[in-house]
Image (tube, helix red, strand yellow):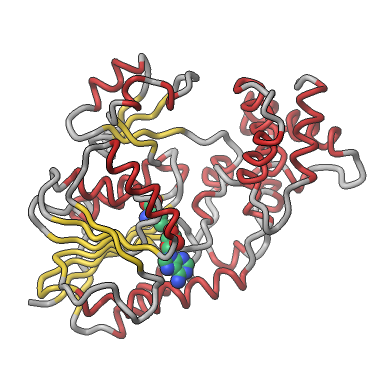
Amino acid sequence: MIDQALLNHAAGVLKTISADQRADTALRYYFERHGYIQPPARRVISHAVFVYFRWFQWLDEKASPQKRLEQAQGLHERFTADPKSIKTEALAALAVPDWLKTELTELPADYLRQLQRDPALWLRARPGQVHRLAKALFCGELTPQAPDALRFTGTSDLFKSEPFKAGAFEIQDLASQLVSVAAAPLPGETWWDACAGEGGKTLHLADLMMNKGLVWATDRHEKRIETLKRRAARAKLFNYRTAFWDGSARLPTKAKFDGILLDAPCSGVGTWQRNPHARWTTTPTDVAELAATQLAMLNHIAGSLKPGGRLVYSVCTLTRSETTAVAAAFTALHPELEPLPLASLKSTQPALFLWPHELNANGMFIATWQRKK
Ligand SMILES: C[S@@+](CC[C@H](N)C(=O)[O-])C[C@H]1O[C@@H](n2cnc3c(N)ncnc32)[C@H](O)[C@@H]1O
């Protein structure tokens, strides 16, 4: 059980969380205001808050926040010791909101169990360096799914490690890594990472291109692009350029690309293990609005592909509206493009769901097309 003082801090954080203030943001602000709380205590408080939202619908509404945090911790410990001790029916009824059931093609018991576990932490080593990295960090598990992925199993502060300072790895979820693996850009090509954000996938594309060719990285948030530039400098990657794009029909360039990645804004259902608070704030209206935005963005960028160019659409969500429905609508609107099998993910299908329980990572949907020659 958690120390009472830490429990009080966790209850203090809960007071500052709302539909507009995500749990991770609330935690960051809370720790900024309470600078004396040391990293090990911060980890316990953060964990208590995330566990609280994972077990939210089991908790006694009338109890105090501290009592509810304790109840959640008790459920977490019981579930960790014996995952079967919580029935699948209870998980289906309480671990996710009801509306999700109309948006998923299936609701596997293993997926529900995965949602209640602590998430794995994945690193992406620079190409060819994964074994050296595992050695330098003294721990980690490789996966056959992605050549540079390493699951970090230690507890030390990665940001203080020598390999981090040397730019030897990025913290990047395995499902996100598989998006760039699916894109499979070649050295010398020109790509557009249209929703680049802080550059997780831009850096991966640039790495796969072995620092040759060019990646255009665009986003509507200036601050995210600034972070991308800092990360690229640390990784010593120079084959990219940045520009503003807000998703509208006003494109940042008239250039035509060998490949375009649209890692679109989405409801983030695939991140609900890591970010359980979002289970209770995301609405079907968000899903419908985001699906419309995603289709509009795809339509705007489709004309920027060269003949033979590849388009990759990815979203870290699993809702039908934002995945298969968007892909089907887009295919129907664009006879000049044809769905392209995801060969680099060893699939004959042009669209794939990556499930959290199969990967021990975020959920993701990836679809690809090729412009006819
Ligand atoms: C899923 S995130 C991208 C994450 C990034 N690719 C990565 O790997 O780190 C989606 C991005 O789309 C950007 N974006 C651009 N135009 C947008 C629009 N019209 N609405 C919402 N987000 C938009 C957001 O700023 C956000 O950074």
Dividing the picture into quadrants, the one containing residue 8 is top right
Residue in view at x 64 percent, y 27 percent: 42
Residue in view at x 38 percent, y 40 percent: 172
Residue 215 vertical position relative to residue 371 in the rendered view, above or below: above
Residue 60 vertical position relative to residue 250 in the rendered view, above or below: above
Q: Nearer the viewer, residue 311 or 100?
A: 311
Classify residue 154 as left or right of residue 373: right
Residue 62: tell me if it is visible: yes
Q: Nearer the viewer, residue 183 or 111?
A: 183
| Residue 81: percent from left, percent from top | 64, 23
Residue in view at x 28 percent, y 51 percent: 202
Residue in view at x 92 percent, y 45 percent: 62
Q: Nearer the viewer, residue 49 or 207?
A: 207
| Residue 174: percent from left, percent from top | 36, 41
Furthest residue toward right: 62
**Ligand 1 quadrant in view:** bottom left
Classify residue 336 as left or right of residue 11: left
The quarter of the picture where the C terminus appears is: bottom left
Residue 133 vertical position relative to residue 315 in the rendered view, above or below: above
| Residue 112: percent from left, percent from top | 58, 46
The quarter of the picture where the N terminus appears is: top right
| Residue 259: percent from left, percent from top | 19, 64
Classify residue 265 as left or right of residue 123: right
